[in-house]
Amino acid sequence: MDRRAFVAGLALGTLAAPHAARAQPARTIYRIGILSLSTTSGLVGPEPRSPSTKALLRGLRELGYVYGEHFVTEPRGGAGRPERFPALAAELVRARVDVILAAGPALPALKETTSTIPVIMTATLDPVRQGFVQSLRHPGGNFTGFSLQSAETVGKRLELLRELVPGAAPLAVLWDQLSVLDWRAAEATAGERGWPLVSFEIRDAGGIEAAFRAARNAHVGSLLVSAAGILFANARRVAEVAAKNRVPSIYGLREYVEAGGLISYGASIEDIWRRAAVFVDKILKGTKPADLPIEQPTKFELVINLKTAKTLGLTIPPSVLARADEVIE
């Protein structure tokens, strides 16, 4: 081969190599942060134990995302201790994740920690009244996602309690500051119906047992437990104490009933986490959270634990059983 032709070819090849590299950039692997009340170990990897995280990954698979190829998760779990959320939120910010998914109890910490990383709310009681977004249609900041609009279903839960435990005995509500909207909605509903209502507010988990003892001593007929904050972080404990004090109780989320509670009526959290994948997809493709309207639940479920009903000596009316989406035997 002519020496000049060889040198020219070598030079052209050298010049072409960087061009080829630029034409095929390395694939970006997105990092999806998850902030949860669960333990971190239950949230990790492509096959997590957490039902809500499983639902999210299922939703992402349905959209064509492959774990490890297109994204990985960066989970942080509070292990039932909401007071850990500020430190865990700061960890996710330092990790420079592309988006964070979190439910109601974790949102205040994220609000304080970041105004730039997109946050997808996997349900909170009422994000407008709680100050996370400007409006449902125009969130206006770095938060978007789902609203439980829990206060709007409080009336339905109180009506179910009246069906389960008819009579003149007062109804009661167990709540904390994160669920004050539920208490106000219950107060308004009971006032309209003329139902006597008793309030039991707790400040920390240590107040759970005392609240149920007070409810039993006040001879309440039944009790509504809010879904948020301290109470949800201690769902199993709440269900056990309710049974111990023989207080028929209704909850806003099925997780309480799976932990031994009597009955729940509310949005399907697993369905919300699966649908949250659509928000993740849009944000990763460049849509700003401020431009993604808040969605409300589309799937509600009535779940009944017959074992707990038997423990309480309570017969579930056939009209309520017939409406149940799931009955735990």
Image (spheres, rainbow, N blue to C red):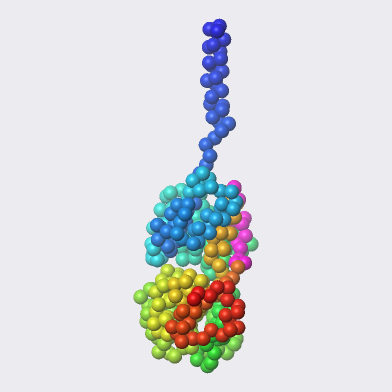
The furthest residue to the top: 2
In the figure, 328 relative to 96: above or below?
Answer: below
- The residue at the point 51 percent across, 86 percent down is 315
Q: Based on the displayed image, in which of its 4 quarters is residue 277 positioned?
A: bottom right
Query: The magenta stretch spans which residues?
Result: 285-298
Look at 42% across and 85% down and name the residue there. 246
Residue at point 56% right, 28% down? 20
**Which of the pair 145/305 is nearer the observer?**
305
Residue 207, horizontal then vertical, whole percent? 37, 78
Using the rendered image of the protein, determine whether residue 241 is visible from the camera's viewpoint.
yes
Residue 143 visible in the snapshot: no
User: Looking at the image, which is closer to me, 54 or 292?
Assistant: 54
Q: Residue furthest front?
A: 329
Q: Position of residue 74 (x, y in %)?
A: 45, 52
Q: Quadrant of the N terminus?
A: top right
Left or right: where does residue 217 sit relative to residue 58?
Answer: left
Q: Is residue 296 a member of the stretch shown in magenta?
A: yes
| In-front residue for pair 48/72 | 48
The secondary structure that dominates the magenta segment is loop
